[in-house]
Image (cartoon, coloured by chain):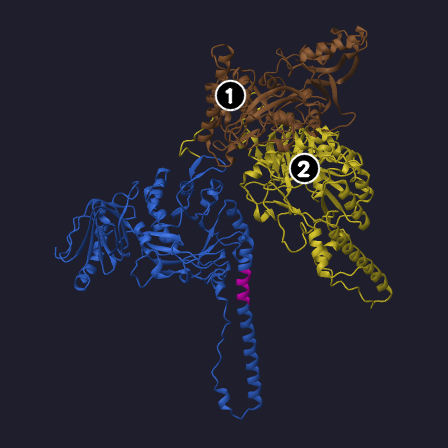
Amino acid sequence: MIQITKRSLAMALMVTIFVTDIPFSSGLSIQIAGVSEAQDPPRRRRRGGRRPAPPPATPEPEKKEAEPAHAEDAEYLAIVGATIHTVTGPVIRDGTILCKDGKISSIGADISVPASAEKIEASGFHVYPGLVAFRSAGLIGSGDPQKTQDPFSLGTVMGLAAGITSTWNGSTVGKLVRGSLEDLTLRKASFVNLTYTSRNPGGKRELRQALEKVQEHLRALERHAEEKKENPDAKAPDDKWIRGAFSTAKLLLTGERVALSRVSTITDLKQVCELARRFGFDLVIEGGEEAWIDPGLVARTGASVVLTPRARRNAVEDRNMKSGSSIENAKILHEHGIPLAIRPSASGIALWGLAGRDLGHLPMEAAFAVRGGLSEKAAIEAITIEPARILGVADRVGSIEVGKDADFIITDGDLLSYLTHVRWAVINGKIQYDKMKEGLLDHIRPDGVEKPEPPDDHWPRRLGDPL
Amino acid sequence: MRTLSLVFLAGFVTFLGWPSTTCAADSLVFKVGKVVTMDQQDRVVNNAVVLVEDGKIAAIGRARDIEIPAGATVVERPELWLVPGFVECHNHTGGSGSDLHDYIYLTNPGLRTLESIVPDNPEMVRARAGGVTTILTIPGSGNNMSGFGTILKTAGSSSVEEAVLKAPGSLKIAQAGNPERYFYGVGRSFMNFNTRQTLRKARDYHLARTAWEQGELEEEPPKDLHWEEFRALFRRETVASVHTQIYQVLMTTVKMVAGEFGIRTVLDHSTFDAWKVAPLVLEDETIYTINGPRQIHYDRTQRRIMGNAARWWQGGVRKLGINTDAPVVPQEELFYQATMACYYGWTPYEALRGVTRIPAEALMLDHRLGSITVGLDADFCLWTGDPIDPRSSCEMTVIDGEITYEASKKRVF
Amino acid sequence: MNSICLKVLPATVWILLASLVAAPAVCQAQRSSEPVIVIRASRVITGTGETLAPGEVVIDDGKISLVGNQLEVPENAQVIDARGQTLMAGMILASTKHGLQRLSRNGTNCDFTPMSQLIDEEMPWQDFLEAGFVAVALVPSGSGFPGRTVVVSTDPDNSDRILKDGAYLPVNGGSLYSTFSRSFDAARGEIEKVKKAREKWDKEQEEAKKKAEEEAKKDDGEKKDDEKKEPPKEFKPPAMNPSLVPLVKILEEKEDALPIMYSARTPGLVLHLDEAISQVKELKDRDPITLFQLPGASNGAFHEVVDLLGEREATVVMPPRLSALPDTYVRFSLPAALSRAGCKLVSIPINDDAASMRALPRMVAELVRFGVSEEDAIASVTLQAAKLLGIEDRMGTVEAGKEPHFVLFDSDPLVPGARVMKTIIGGKVVWDREDR
């Protein structure tokens, strides 16, 4: 075994496991994008890349609690008469969603609505779960949004207008709650940012060695546990050296963390996948422009992919192998059963004019995946339940199910249509965005009018006009 | 010239002794579910046939009304829509990226992109995959007047001559909003002065040459390559593509370029709050507004997000198109600029016209491009549905009657 | 008619009463060495809801003794003739760092005072006086709890500079949650430290007592007077970290605990404040913090928290400027909105410099344009500031019994272009435009 000092190894790992766009970087220590919390047990590795268990064929909706007694003091919100796209279950036409104290309490065609409930008459509208943006900047506060959120920021409003209700800010998964600090944080995402590329062969080797060393240690621990049964005084293997980079390696190997790797080329992709297979840790690939070339490998690794369907990467023509991006990437990966989330190329919302490439148009990004052959159902999953699963918050958001958080959007049309706007956005059972009251987009197809009168121009605004 | 060569080619073929009946073999027939003609009558024909002969559209109509010539190659795709090829009015990818600018003077009137065209570059493949069949490649906006652009087809021809449709295709003028980067950091006052001076010199040259040609001058004014291309501009045989952004810049463009010098003007970009001057633009019927790539303007005076194209349309401007400024937005996403225009309030049919017939008219090429009309170039694409919808894809691209892209062979976009 | 003859106007009946009380004092003053000072102005804005035109203010023995109009004054009185001018209470600047030496500390430094940043000879007292300020609250620099605010007189020749050592504890900086939890945890630690020491001492005492008793039993008969004469020890609490003492006082709800002044740069921080303070269990159920400084007040998003601040009847220190609604050009007056919602306004200049200070009356006048009453507008630089700093019994209005600090304007102070003509501290003209 090659001997290297712990210090240099740690340094090498720092270089290796490094990513540039995670905002909270202590600089010196290895970057862990969050600490998993007790609420979420360590995830079990999915063997053979099977997709998560499909939902039951006929799930909750017909839950009839035989005229449930409505609590007097509970807060109710009812969405009545809409087409409900539950995502994990069937589409319910002319259905009602009843929310109680921020949770979905019932979904179905005939549901009794308590008189005290706030009602949205949504006949002709569509309800989708609030979209989950895999990675964002400026939509919620940085770090722990519970402590940093500016609940009056325009970025939050714009995110809601785009249909996004939850997002990962690089550290924590939070909700786009406005005007209050209630129930902002969902959980910390447990990623280790991993770079393993042939452009840095030294770092690559040392990362592998660290993993090997920790793996050896874990085996020794197992042996020790066996030994202990017979000999209670057996000495436990030394673990004082498991610090810094080694402890991160340990978290990966024990499955307490998921590796998040930004990979573009097929060469790097193969190496990362092989590393994950060799050491058996969970892997999420971000980017993956050339993943379509070897989807089988990604599937065998059990990795999830977060991709941008229309990302451009030119093929290298002088190489005797496939290369370059493909609009069919999403379709091909999905056909191989790889869990798929979609994100646009920009992680913020741009108000300076170049529309359509940012988080403000997340459903359009999904539409590009449909262009490449992905089914519309899978495309919608890739911006709702799949990112929620990857971020470990699928127990609360990402689909419309009884018991989940009452986070959804009510749109004036098919989510993937380019004429569809979000009419209302609801988080925790409270209306957070109302297109016609918000003013930002109210002049565009108000109440479905295709060619409305132009909005009045109040310009220049007189000084001292009332608020 | 082109007609001449066709006549010559026909003669050559006859000379070789091919039987005259084989001309049907040159016919290509497209049987499709729908043709969005984008012609003056805004016809949409279902279950249609488009007949192509000699690279031109020979017939268009319902399947039962058109007689398919014997021996013609038939492409039968009843599930697809046939839509005119898109025309891009503002492109920089026809050559190599380094040929975008020659920062010699603030105005470089004699330059042409024609010399830097690479007709078979990889961007052309992507353009075809996005349904774009014609592009106007113009120099950048780093100086006030950076030269004359070239209109070419994206077929990926092997020679420049074959690819080029019209040169000079337009004069590129940049009215503020980029030329400030020129070495001396010029402001709007000087830029306007400088542009006006250049145009005056060019006009003087044109008038002197014209006077001599008509025998009004005895001595021939010396020929000057600096100004030669401008003559087509002052004869209104070609246009000026003016990079305009905020409304103040747009006003000076309309007043100076279109008004004072009588040049046919295309307002490229016309973004930010430029739609506020729609009434002024309406005064000159020959002005075309080709909006983009910025599709929204955040209006702080009223906390509203304005769709630029929608606001131009609401202001009464009907000669309204869309551009990408490729590579600012990839060339294949020209349709997506229209998608965004619609998301922010424009309407799909008008937006589709804004990437087909309108830019063809703007470039004075509507007799060749922009609609499915008998006699026009057979430039069109077969789509799986509404081309404005990102979910639809371009399955086949035909340029000058030749299939230049087929998604079934290799899907690019 | 032997002392002062009054011609009382109906509107100023109360002044008669005041004068009756004050009259003996005036008589006494005549016997003392210092002469009575009378300021005659065309208008006197008392700050108590009264405007006298013309008006006189009588100063006797270093205090205002009479406020009235058309008073007859004794012959030996020193008269300051300010006819054509308007007199009001000297202005008070509730927060400034102007002229202080640059020295800032981050963290919890509640014992720190800006006096260590002050070099009296180098202070630009003239800047304050020219703007009409008679007292200014100096704020220590730094993030976290940078120290306590000290109110000083602006009189250049004043040897007794400090008016109040400790008016409020400013708190600012980004990491609000950790600032509160860390600082108050440390303060709680100090309390625990003393408590433990006390327990230990008590135990020791008890043990010593037992021992003594046992020994007394043992040695009964043997009298060891020397040892027993030792005086009983007193508990000496261990010294607390001085930087935490003010926080300890807050936790223990001491009388002299200083209020916390919270600097909120964005409106969201007003919400975060309550969350952050609720981390400190002792403060959880107390009245919320009511002193706010809004340095980012031009951010119109503050309109979102106007009602929240109004509900807690907050005192808000901010420049009286216009804001634009967030991400728009739609303008409104945040202080006016706050005032309507029930907040108390304290106005400070836009920037901490001489020119902005001189512009303050003009800015305050704008408040009136947006619906704040003239009285409240003037109070925002006088009485409310005095109340905030806890010196309202000494200054802030022109009333009998208060200290004679005034500012004289060449016109109504709320008329644009009004200029400070004289600044008077302790009855003495310390700044006069005519001297310039």
| Location of residue A209 in the rendering, given as x and y in whole percent from the top left corner | 78, 55
Q: Is residue C68 left or right of residue A142?
A: left
Q: Which chain is blue?
A: C
Residue carrying label 1: B315
| Location of residue B156 in the rendering, given as x and y in whole percent from the top left corner | 71, 24
Q: Is residue C182 above or below residue A51?
A: below
Q: Which chain is brown?
A: B
Q: Is residue A52 left or right of residue B188?
A: right
Kindly indicate the quadrant of the structure image that contains residue A238. bottom right
Q: Furthest residue to the front?
A: B219
Q: What is the chief secondary structure element of the magenta stretch?
A: helix
Kindly indicate the quadrant of the structure image that contains residue B14. top right
Kindly indicate the quadrant of the structure image that contains residue A324. top right
Image: magenta residue range: C184-192
Q: Does dot 1 land on a helix, a strand or a loop?
A: loop
Q: Tag 2, which chain?
A: A
| Location of residue C253 in the rendering, given as x and y in whole percent from the top left corner | 47, 60
Q: Between B356 and C22, which is closer to the camera in this rendering? A: B356
Q: Is residue B341 above or below residue C327?
A: above
Label 1 CA crowd tier, 10 Å (few <14, some 14–19, many 20+):
some
Q: What number is the disc on residue A343?
A: 2
Determine the CA span between mark 2 and mark 1: 35 Å
Q: Which chain is yellow?
A: A
- Kindly identify the residue that appears in the image at 35 percent across and 53 percent down: C386
Magenta stretch holds residue C277: no
Q: Is residue C264 above or below residue C165?
A: above
Q: Amino acid at mark 1?
A: Gly
Q: Between A403 and C130, which is closer to the camera in this rendering? A: C130
